[in-house]
């Protein structure tokens, strides 16, 4: 029977051919005794409207993908570098600017410190990247710092990491998009009045791209990422050549007679603030460790190699842009028109108002728009892991038609849009909230790895422990620096994260309570039910739907009664006469409702039945069978079942009560049955 041929040879001489009927073949594939695999046709809509909607969905998001096609959705190293590293690489477009915005407050002489600060941040990037390579090899199933903390530290630390990363991913989308809009405005100043609208449209388009699935989003994002990287490397090479070989650079600022040196002028606090602002360059480095399962096999090695390339590329771009900007004396300009540092560097090297300049600005804006995609991959995956652990609603673990975590993608988009609107799409206003959360995750993740190596003690564990311990100490200090330097705005994150933790604990407690209530011993053998059962059928009149519901009730238990809630005694009397004539074996209870209520009297009647039950017997299960008429057209549904819906909502959750909906659908025109004769 496993063959797909519709005709087989018969076993008897006269049966040359026997037709084999497989009623399941259209919708299911036979996989063994009592086991079927649903085909795509089983999920197709059955109505014309549903099929029309499905065609639109296919046009927007593509066809449904089976779980068996997931391996085809895995990412190569080239596509993974574009998807997971676009956030980190694109931060080189605004990290230098954030350093200069702080140093410029102390005058032109302070700008000389931008390059040493950038080098310091690059060294910090190296330490963090080495630590994450070890994390990838130790926890190849993904989850990043959350998985490490969950496995090695008390549970609250894992939730702190989760809350910090969720906040940081939302901030990544908002900051990257706002910065991209500023790049557009730098080239086209006339668009400044619609900067928020441009950002919102961009986020929606990125959301739609991710809803199509990983592989297709990789195709979309790879080209801008690589063009930006090569274009920026070209700027750095040409800039270094002009500065070193041709001697082009801005003249160094001359200190005033008797003025203190630059370090004294700037002050330690301002240097710390500049370092904290430039540390946004490190955001996104954790994304690869979170998304290891998205790589093609061997996943850990491919992820570790991609992380190495990303770290080297980001370090070169960040330090290179800072060197060129510092050498040419470039600073941010906000008035009379917005001119970002990266746009001024590009104009200096490629020429202002040239084709190369506009092309570079275009791809800078694109990679910043698409840098948000790192969060669109990391946020839904982390939310899915939290959902599987019971700390977020389970809907976040559901994968849509394209194997994407749909709910996480949509929620992230909404949260980022709210931030964009609240802060007017201004990057500098968003930066103080940025990077605080990610350094919390860095620190706790490294501490978790220290515990991991202490307990595992595998080959080379002392070296690995030393690296992660140093990384934890360094990122912990940087976290305190960033938190203090960006205060008081940064303290808002310190409020949001505890709120998220409390919410996750509340969700987990609810799930745990319901699981404990529903749990059964694995050794228990379930006997037949002993509890008595009774059935109540609310009836408005006698019709086909009511008769069908009564017949269903008869199949459940012998103790059955119909209940009519009526505010018209005369109509109720006529109903009783007709009921006893047409359904004589089913008792009818009439409850008069002079206050014209339906749900309240029905619930009160059920309570009375419970109270009259003998105290020495266990309360019975009460089945409430509700007849429901199913309209043939969508526009008819607003005309029917309002009372049934209200009653069903009121009964759900009532102790010892089971609600049974009995839908009746009129497929063809039917005549009422003839009355019995005789």
Image (cartoon, rainbow, N blue to C red):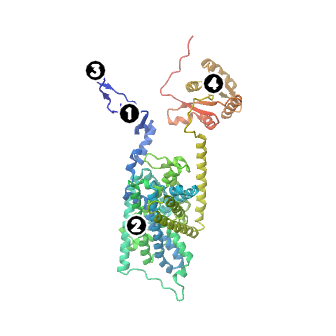
Labels 4 and 2: the sequence-earlier one: 2
Q: Of marks 1 and 2, which one's residue comes earlier in the chain?
A: 1
- Residue 334 seen in the current view: no
Residue 347 position in % (x across, y down): 40, 72
- Residue 145: percent from the left, percent from the top? 50, 58
Q: From the top left corner, tell me how far across and down residue 418 is, in percent.
A: 54, 57
Q: Which residue is mark 1?
A: 25
Depth check, front residue: 322 or 467: 467
Q: Residues within 10 Å of mark 2 (few under 14, many from 20)?
A: some
Q: Which residue is mark 2?
A: 313
Residue 247 appearing in the image: yes
Q: Nearer the viewer, mark 2 or mark 3?
A: 3
Q: Secondary structure at mark 3?
A: loop
Quadrant of res 27: top left
Disc 1 and disc 3: Cα gap in Å?
28 Å
Determine whether, in the image, residue 168 is placed left or right of residue 71.
right
Q: Find disc 3 in the rendering and name its residue.
A: 13
| Residue designated by label 4 | 559
Using the numbered discs, state the Cα–Cα distance from disc 1 to disc 2 in whole angstroms.
53 Å
> Label 4 to label 2, Cα distance in Å?
76 Å
Rendered image quadrant of residue 657: top right
- In this rendered view, identify the residue nearer to me: 213 or 306: 306
Q: CA distance from mark 1 to mark 4?
A: 42 Å
- Viewer-side label of 3, 4: 3
Whichever of labels 3 and 4 marks the residue nearer the N terminus, that label is: 3
- Which quarter of the image is occupied by the N terminus? top left
């Amino acid at each position: 029977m496993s063959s797909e041929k519709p005709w087989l040879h018969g076993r008897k001489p006269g049966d040359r051919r026997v037709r084999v009927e497989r009623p399941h073949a259209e919708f299911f594939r036979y996989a063994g005794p009592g086991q079927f695999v649903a085909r795509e046709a089983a999920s197709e809509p059955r109505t014309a409207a549903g099929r029309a909607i499905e065609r639109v969905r296919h046009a927007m998001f593509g066809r449904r993908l089976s779980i068996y096609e997931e391996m085809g959705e895995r990412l190569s190293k080239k596509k993974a570098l574009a998807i997971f590293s676009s956030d980190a690489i694109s931060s080189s477009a605004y990290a230098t600017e954030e350093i200069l915005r702080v140093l410029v407050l102390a005058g032109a002489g302070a700008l000389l410190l931008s390059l040493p600060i950038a080098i310091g941040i690059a060294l910090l990037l190296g330490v963090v990247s080495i630590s994450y390579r070890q994390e990838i090899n130790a926890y190849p199933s993904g989850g990043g710092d959350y998985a490490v903390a969950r496995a090695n530290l008390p549970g609250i630390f894992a939730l702190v990491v989760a809350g910090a990363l969720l906040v940081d991913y939302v901030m990544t989308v908002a900051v990257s998009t706002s910065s991209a809009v500023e790049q557009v405005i730098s080239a086209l100043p006339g668009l400044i009045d619609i900067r928020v609208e441009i950002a919102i449209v961009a986020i929606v388009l990125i959301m739609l791209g991710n809803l199509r699935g990983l592989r297709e989003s990789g195709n979309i994002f790879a080209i801008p990422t690589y063009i930006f990287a090569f274009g920026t490397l070209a700027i750095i090479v040409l800039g270094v050549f002009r500065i070193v070989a041709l001697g082009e650079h801005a003249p160094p600022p001359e200190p005033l007679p008797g003025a203190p040196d630059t370090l004294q002028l700037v002050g330690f606090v301002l240097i710390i603030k500049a370092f904290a602002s430039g540390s946004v360059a490190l955001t996104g480095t954790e994304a690869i460790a979170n998304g290891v399962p998205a790589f093609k096999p061997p996943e850990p090695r491919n992820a570790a190699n991609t992380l190495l390339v990303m770290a080297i590329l980001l370090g070169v771009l960040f330090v290179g842009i800072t060197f060129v900007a510092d050498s040419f004396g470039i600073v941010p300009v906000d008035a009379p028109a917005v001119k970002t540092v990266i746009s001024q560097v590009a104009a200096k090297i490629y020429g202002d108002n040239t084709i190369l300049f506009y092309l570079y600005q275009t791809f800078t804006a694109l990679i910043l728009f698409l840098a948000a995609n790192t969060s669109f991959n990391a946020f839904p995956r982390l939310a899915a892991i939290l959902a599987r652990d019971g700390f977020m609603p389970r809907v976040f673990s559901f994968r849509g038609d394209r194997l994407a975590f749909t709910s996480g993608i949509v929620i992230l988009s909404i949260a980022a849009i709210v931030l964009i609107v609240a802060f007017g799409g201004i990057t500098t206003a968003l930066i103080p909230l940025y990077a605080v959360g990610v350094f919390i995750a860095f620190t706790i993740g490294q501490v978790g790895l220290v515990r991991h190596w202490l307990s595992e003690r595998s080959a080379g564990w002392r070296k690995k422990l030393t690296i992660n311990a140093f990384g934890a100490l360094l990122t912990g200090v940087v976290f305190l620096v960033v938190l203090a330097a960006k205060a008081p705005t940064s303290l808002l994150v310190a409020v949001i994260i505890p709120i998220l933790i409390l919410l996750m604990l509340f969700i987990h407690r609810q799930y745990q309570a319901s699981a404990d209530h529903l749990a059964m011993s694995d050794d228990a053998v379930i006997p037949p039910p002993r509890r008595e059962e009774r059935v109540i059928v609310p009836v408005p009149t006698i019709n086909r739907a009511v008769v069908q519901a009564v017949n269903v009730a008869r199949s459940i238990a012998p103790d059955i009664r119909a209940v009519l809630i009526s505010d018209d005694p005369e109509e109720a009397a006529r109903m009783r006469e007709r009921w006893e004539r047409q359904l004589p074996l089913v008792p009818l209870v009439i409850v008069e409702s002079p206050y014209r209520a339906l749900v309240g009297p029905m619930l009160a009647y059920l309570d009375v039945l419970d109270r009259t039950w003998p105290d020495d017997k266990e309360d019975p299960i009460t089945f409430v069978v509700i007849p429901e008429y199913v309209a043939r057209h969508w526009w008819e549904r607003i005309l029917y079942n309002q009372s049934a819906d209200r009653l069903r909502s009121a009964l759900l959750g009532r102790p010892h009560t089971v609600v049974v909906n009995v839908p009746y659908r009129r497929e063809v025109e039917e005549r009422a049955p003839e009355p019995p004769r005789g």
